[in-house]
Amino acid sequence: MYVNEGAVVESCISQALVSNGYRIHFYSKPNSSLKMDFVISYKGHLTALETRSGKTKISGSLLMLTSGDYKVERGIKIADGPVGVDGHGILHLPLFAPCFFDIPRIETAPSRTPRK
């Protein structure tokens, strides 16, 4: 029986982020292979978050988004591997890490007094 482990991992990461109060976004560039699993605001920085479940740990999209003309300030790769920061400044974290991300401060717009 075939199980799409990537989809399962992405679903679990999505649930962990949403449960911790993050607004999650997906990015895909039209007519390109550039895509990102999640784009979030993490500790006040626009952050691209890539999940990897299989043996392939390379993420060209993550490198492109964090080093190109895009406004992404940080990159995090969630995978089954060692914790650390690589030579490109990408933070590598284990699969369970998003469960423990700091809960973001929800900023709300000032309330408006209705006109009479």
Image (cartoon, rainbow, N blue to C red):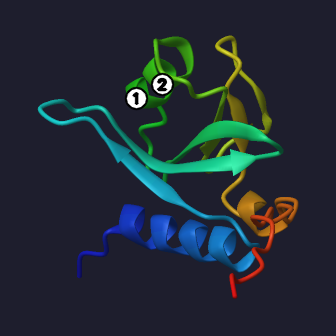
Which quarter of the rendering shows the C terminus?
A: bottom right
Q: How far apart are labels 2 and 1 at the CA level?
A: 6 Å
Query: Is the C-beta separation of discs 2 and 1 under 8 Å?
Result: yes
- Disc 2 crowd rating (10 Å Cα; few below 14, some 14-19, many 20+) is many
Kind of residue indicated by mark 2: Leu
- Disc 1 crowd rating (10 Å Cα; few below 14, some 14-19, many 20+) is some
- Nearer-the-camera pick, 104 or 6: 104
- Nearer-the-camera pick, 110 or 34: 110
Q: Residue at x 44, y 73 (%)?
A: 8
Which percent across, then down, holds residue 28?
30, 42
**Callout 1 secondary element:** helix
Which percent across, then down, holds residue 96?
72, 64
Look at discs 2 and 1 and give the one toward the viewer: 2
Which percent across, then down, holds residue 108?
77, 67
Q: Residue at x 47, y 64 (%)?
A: 10
**What residue is disc 1 on?**
61
Left-right relation of 7 to 48:
left
Q: Residue at x 56, y 21 (%)?
A: 66
Which quarter of the rendering shows the N terminus?
A: bottom left
**Callout 2 secondary element:** helix
Which percent across, then down, holds residue 5?
40, 67
Q: Residue furthest bottom?
A: 116
Numbered circle sitting on residue 31? none
Q: Quadrant of residue 85?
A: top right
Up/down of 84 relative to 112, above or below: above
**What residue is disc 2 on?**
65
Q: Residue at x 77, y 69 (%)?
A: 99
Left-right relation of 13 to 3:
right
Q: Quadrant of residue 84?
A: top right
Kind of residue indicated by mark 1: Ser
Up/down of 81 relative to 102, above or below: above
- Nearer-the-camera pick, 75 or 85: 75
